[in-house]
Structure formats: C-alpha cells, structure tokens
C-alpha cells in the first residue's frame, strides 16, 4: 500500500461524531471505507486513493463517557480542493458505525499549506531582523561615517548625557543620542542630548553658563518638549525640524537651514499662539498660573507618582476626587462639580484632553502628553 508523503499533504479533513454505545477505532475506519465505497466512482474510491498515496493514514481519537463514545477523525489528503470536499461530504453520509447508529459531521477542512505559509512568513520576518550587514552603498557609507563620529561622542555629567564638544559659548540641546550622532555626522559638534523627554539637571546647569539652543522635532512631541524645557531651564533660542521630520533624520542642508532659522523663546511661543486655531469657538488665552501654584501641583504629582491615578482639583487646588486614569473620561463626563485642574499619573491622550476641555478644566499636570492641541494649560513634570 502506498503511503502519502507528509510533504505532499494539502488538506486535512477534521470530523467528529458521538454515539450511544462502545466503539473501537477499527469500527470507525471500517465504516469510513465500507460506507463510502462506490459513492463517488472508481476515481475517488477511498481504498484506492490510499493505495495511490492520495489519502493518508486516517487518525481516530476516541473518548468514552458512561455508555457514550465520542470521537475526532482526521483525514490527510493530497487531492485538490474540489476532490477533498467531495471526500468530506461523502463521509457525512455514514449512518452507522459498528453496531451503533451514528452521523459524522465535518467540522472543517484545513489548508495545511496555509499554515505552512503563515509559518514561513513569520519566520522570514524574524530572519530579516537578524540579517547583519548591508549591500546598500549608502548604508555602508553612513556606517563608516558613524564609526568615526562615534569616537567623537562623549558623556557629560552624572547622567552621562551623550554630547560633542561643549567648549563653545552656544550649545545645541537635542532629545536623544541619535540626534547627537546625526549632528556630529554633519559637522555640528557643540551638541548635547537630554536622553529623553525629561530634563536632566545638567542641562539646567549649562543654561546658567551657556547660550542654549533647543533643537526639537517638527511634531507635537517636539512642542511639548519645548514647553517643558523652557519652563525648567534657561533657553535662549529654539530651532525646529521641518514639519513631520525628526532631528535624527535631517540632511546636512536641513540642519544648517533650521539652525539659521532659530528664534528666541518668546517669539517661538508667540508664533505658535498665532498659528493655533481656536477649538470649538473658544478663543480665550491659556491660563497663566504663578510659581506657588506650580509647586503645589508638582507636589501633588510627586505624591501620586506610580499610582496610575488622576487627581481632580477645584480652583483652590484642593482635591475633590481621585479616580483611575482609565476611568477619568467617564468621571469628567458625569461630574456635576466645577473642575479647575487635574493631576495625572500617566499619559494624557487626545480623548482625555477633549473631555477635560468639555468639562471646563483649565490646567492639566502630567508626565507625558500625546497631544498639545488644546487651550488647557499643560504642565510637564
């Protein structure tokens, strides 16, 4: 008898049955061969198909519970799709297994090759990630440049901030190490990174001695960083990457052009204010709060750090309610109290901003903001 090769299997027929009575595996297999004989003609005779290697070994798993027997049948085939479905339909005509009345029901026909294709795609993705080296001449060129510039990267302060040569009076502050590397690669050496969005103490110290130019990405995140840094350090100028671009991906021409376009901090925020379109007819200016209120909000933020809570405050900055960040939007919608400020331990999403605006909130203090498109005063801690 010919055997079907595992590599030639195309489809797997999955069927099930349940009968009153005790059965053995030979009873099931005998019923399959015996009661389908002659149904589909000699070309699709199951015994002959198995001899030719077009149907594989039929697998039967039985389970007995009291006087009932249930089972699962698996039939591998190397036939095409239409022939396989004919075999599956023929199996469902079986009315008796051994001494018991029964009906077999086909649960599904599995495309085994489809499972193999899924595995191939997933595996190919992993292998792609592990490919080392490159045949792209530009990437090879950049790699050579990077290797020389890497030697120029130094570390500054206890935070070991990536930097270039900080001996100049003017220092360019960027967000991350990749930004430093790109500027060094393009001949701009007086640069230092914050290593993230949180402002390190070393940058504050440099602001007292040097003229800092903050070079930010051309997106909303960059503007949020600008607000946070200028609130906490002395910055003289702000330069911005073109809209939608990051500092780490700028060309030499773009870097030099954007640095030439730098503006003083006051002009930067005035320009942002002029360009901002009022939301839902509300053209009022953002609320200015004093240093004492900022310190109080900062203290509340620190007291609730890692709590994943949102603290709702009245206009005296007294707590009126605290809820989980996840439940904040619902609480704001259902609140019948006046909401002045919210302190959030987590990321402030666009949805939270919109709901807070609708609730009349004036100030939100948090660590991260997914958007700054709002008239609410945002404080980053």
Image: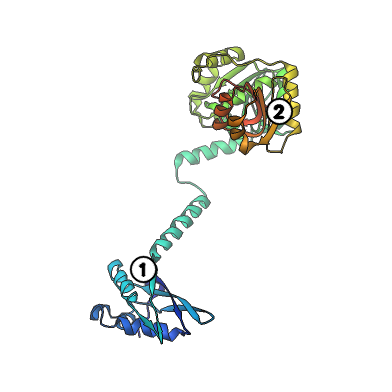
Between 320 and 282, the residue placed more toward the observer is 320
Whole-percent x and y of residue 249? Answer: 51, 32
Tell me: residue 250, above or below residue 2.
above
Report if residue 205 is visible in the image: no
Quick check: 343 left or right of 17?
A: right
Query: Would you identify the image quadrant in which residue 270 lies?
Result: top right
Report if residue 251 is visible in the image: yes
Mark 2, residue position: 320
Residue 337 bears which disc, if any? none
Query: Would you identify the image quadrant in which residue 318 lies?
Result: top right
Residue 10 bears which disc, if any? 1
**How many marks are shown on the rendered structure?**
2
Between 217 and 143, the residue placed more toward the observer is 217
**Residue at figure coordinates x 71%, y 34% from the top left:** 160
Query: Would you identify the image quadrant in which residue 231 lies?
Result: top right
Whole-percent x and y of residue 116? Answer: 42, 63
Q: Quadrant of the N terminus?
A: bottom left
Whole-percent x and y of residue 285? Answer: 58, 14
Tell me: residue 106, above or below residue 183.
below
């Amino acid at each position: 008898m010919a055997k079907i090769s595992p590599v030639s299997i195309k489809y797997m027929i999955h069927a099930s049955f349940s009968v009153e009575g005790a059965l053995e595996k030979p009873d099931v297999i005998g019923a399959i061969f015996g009661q389908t004989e002659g149904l589909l003609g000699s070309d699709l005779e199951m015994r002959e198909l198995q001899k030719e290697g077009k149907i594989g070994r039929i697998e039967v798993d039985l389970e007995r519970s009291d006087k009932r027997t249930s089972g699962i049948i698996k039939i591998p085939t190397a036939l095409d799709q239409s022939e396989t479905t004919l075999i599956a339909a023929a199996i469902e005509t079986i009315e008796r297994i051994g001494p018991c009345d029964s009906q077999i029901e086909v649960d599904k026909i599995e495309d085994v090759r489809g499972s193999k294709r899924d595995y191939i795609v997933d595996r190919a993705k992993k292998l792609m990630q592990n490919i080392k080296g490159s045949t792209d001449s530009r990437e090879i060129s950049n790699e050579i440049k990077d290797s020389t510039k890497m030697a120029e990267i130094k570390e500054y302060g206890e935070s070991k901030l990536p930097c270039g040569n900080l001996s100049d009076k003017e220092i360019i502050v960027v967000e991350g190490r990749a930004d430093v590397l790109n500027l060094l690669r393009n001949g701009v050496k007086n640069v230092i990174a914050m290593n993230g969005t949180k402002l390190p103490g070393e940058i504050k110290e440099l602001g007292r001695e040097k003229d800092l130019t903050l070079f930010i990405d051309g997106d909303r995140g960059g503007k949020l960083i600008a607000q946070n840094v200028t609130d906490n350090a002395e910055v003289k100028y702000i330069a911005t990457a073109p809209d939608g671009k990051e500092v780490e991906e700028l060309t030499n021409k773009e870097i030099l052009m954007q640095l030439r376009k730098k503006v003083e901090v006051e002009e930067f925020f005035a320009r942002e204010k002029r360009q901002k379109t009022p939301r839902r007819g509300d053209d009022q200016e953002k609320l200015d709060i004093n240093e004492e209120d900022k310190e109080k909000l900062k203290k509340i933020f620190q007291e609730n750090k890692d709590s994943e809570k949102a603290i709702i405050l009245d206009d005296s900055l007294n707590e009126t309610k605290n809820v989980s960040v996840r439940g904040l939007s619902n609480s704001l919608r259902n609140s019948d109290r006046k909401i002045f400020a919210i302190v959030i331990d987590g990321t402030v999403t666009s949805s939270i901003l919109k709901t807070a605006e609708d609730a009349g909130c004036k100030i939100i203090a948090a660590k991260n903001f997914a958007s700054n498109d709002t008239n609410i005063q945002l404080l980053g801690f």
